[in-house]
Amino acid sequence: MKKKLLLFILLIIFSSLFTSCIRRTVKMTSYTHPNYFEKNYQKFCILVEGRTLAERKFYEEIFVENFRDYGIVATEGSILFPPIEEWTEDYYGKVLNKNGYDAFLLVTLSEEILRDELIPKVVTETQTNVNNDTTKKSTKTTTSVSTHKEMQRVLDIALQMHMKIIDVKNNQVSWQGESVKYKDDNNLYQLERQLSYMVDDLVIDLQNKKHLIIYD
């Protein structure tokens, strides 16, 4: 019993250390306009700028999902402002005010590819066939193993996120921040997780500056 308890504690410690090592590669810096210290926002519209349609949808959904996980009301900017034409600043303000948004979060993302190469990988496949012989009332099972080579892509990315909140009522930048994802052993499939960490840091930063309240 004591051994199982010790093992459980060690697993928790290892997991915490692993997570903290990942998060240490993210650096968040931000500033609040003096007129908006401790200004609390209730409803966010989040718009990712300068991306392809698929990328905008991908990133905005991650932002909104993470905000909602904290109990914050948030909507993808591309829903209110579909990227089918260039919307004017006045139009942004009218739509946001009409729908009760008090915060307009604009996000610009950029990536620096640190490593992008193809590495040979040996793949082993096992296939099992079952043949029923009705005349002899027996079953024969055969197993075949085959191997082949394929190329595995290794992609290391340093992600940067530049953000600003526009106070909808006054049409003024109230907060501005930058989050940088430094180099580590990440790849394309971990990009969503890394961005989620960055959004978490954004939410915590805004909470610390009393720009929003997190609800359980």
Image: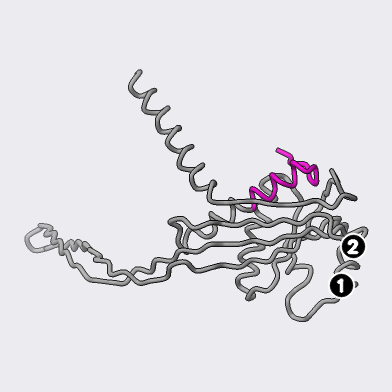
Q: Residue at x 53, y 51 (%)?
A: 25
Hey, what amino acid is under mark 1? Glu
Where does the image place residue 130, in percent across and percent down from the top left? 18, 61
Coordinates of residue 61 in the picture (x, y in percent): 65, 61
The CA span between labels 2 and 1 is: 9 Å
Closer to the camera, 87 or 21? 21
Q: Residue 65, percent across and down?
A: 65, 54
Q: Is residue 63 left or right of residue 106?
A: left
Please say if 12 is above or below 189.
Answer: above
Towards the viewer: 67 or 195: 195
**Residue 152, above or below 216:** below
Based on the displayed image, in which of its 4 quarters is residue 11 positioned? top left
Q: Which residues are magenta?
A: 199-216
| Residue under numbered circle 1 | 89
Q: Nearer the viewer, residue 186 or 4?
A: 186
Are dots 2 and 1 in contact, CB under 8 Å? Answer: yes
Identify the disc placed on residue 56.
none
Query: Is 85 situated left or right of 131 in this image?
Result: right
Residue lying at the far top in this picture: please name it. Answer: 2
Q: Sort mark 2 into few (<14), some (14-19) or many (20+) by Cα contacts within 10 Å.
A: some
What residue lies at 65% left-to-right and 69% top-to-bottom? 56
SS category of the residue bearing label 1? helix
Label whose residue precedes the other's in the sequence (2 or 1)? 1
- The residue that label 2 is drawn on is 171
Q: Reply yes or no: does residue 207 show up in magenta.
A: yes
Residue at x-position 74% and y-position 59%: 75
Residue sitting at x 67%, y 63%: 60
Number of residues whose C-alpha sits closer than 10 Å to that of mark 1, classed few (under 14), some (14–19) or many (20 or more)? few
